[in-house]
Amino acid sequence: MKRAIAITHTETEPSQTVTLDYDNRHRRRMTMCTDAGEKFLLDLAKPAELRDGDDLALEDGTFIRVRAAPEALMQARCENARHLVRTAWHIGNRHLPCEVYADHLVLREDHVIAQMLEQLGCTVTRLTAPFNPEGGAYGHGRTHGHDHG
């Protein structure tokens, strides 16, 4: 089985692609399957966030390009900058992954959170698109799963 041993960015055309949802784009070691059906082993030195457009370098010198799979999302459009910051605070307080734009936020679709956003005065729209939320506060990793104690 081929092994992917590093994440890189290259202008070289990849030999294949692998399409992964957000949950499956934070890995260190696992068997994966390319979009063409070929199995390979992701075998990185440490867990990493696989971003849309990243290339996985295989031992044989070829690359597999990572694609973010379309997912059920929701867009929370805000009235102004203050409203956006206030809404983002509530999202962050719940440790939810979120994409941040100048006038809206994008989150995974969740009817409970959608209701909260609407109560905060946001216009919520459902969409299907790749999900690429902000990374952790210290420049790496995900923002959930830590202890406040």
Image (cartoon, rainbow, N blue to C red):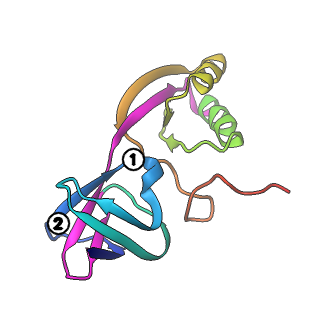
Secondary structure beneath dot 1 equals loop
Q: Residue at x 48, y 38 (%)?
A: 102
Q: Is residue 31 visible?
A: yes
Residue 118 coordinates in the image, percent (x, y): 60, 18
Residue situated furthest front in the rendering:
1
Label for residue 14? 2
| Residue ID at (56%, 45%) | 97
* Quarter the C terminus occupies: bottom right
Q: Is residue 131 positioned above or below 144 on the image?
A: above
The verdict on residue 72 being magenta is yes
Where does residue 119 sit, x and y in percent of width and height?
A: 66, 17
Q: Amino acid at mark 2?
A: Pro
Q: Quadrant of residue 126?
A: top left
Q: Gap between marks 1 and 2, in whole Å?
A: 19 Å
Q: Are marks 1 and 2 in contact (CB under 8 Å)?
A: no
Q: Position of residue 27 (x, y in %)?
A: 47, 63
Q: Which residue is mark 1?
A: 21
**Numbered disc 2: secondary structure:** loop
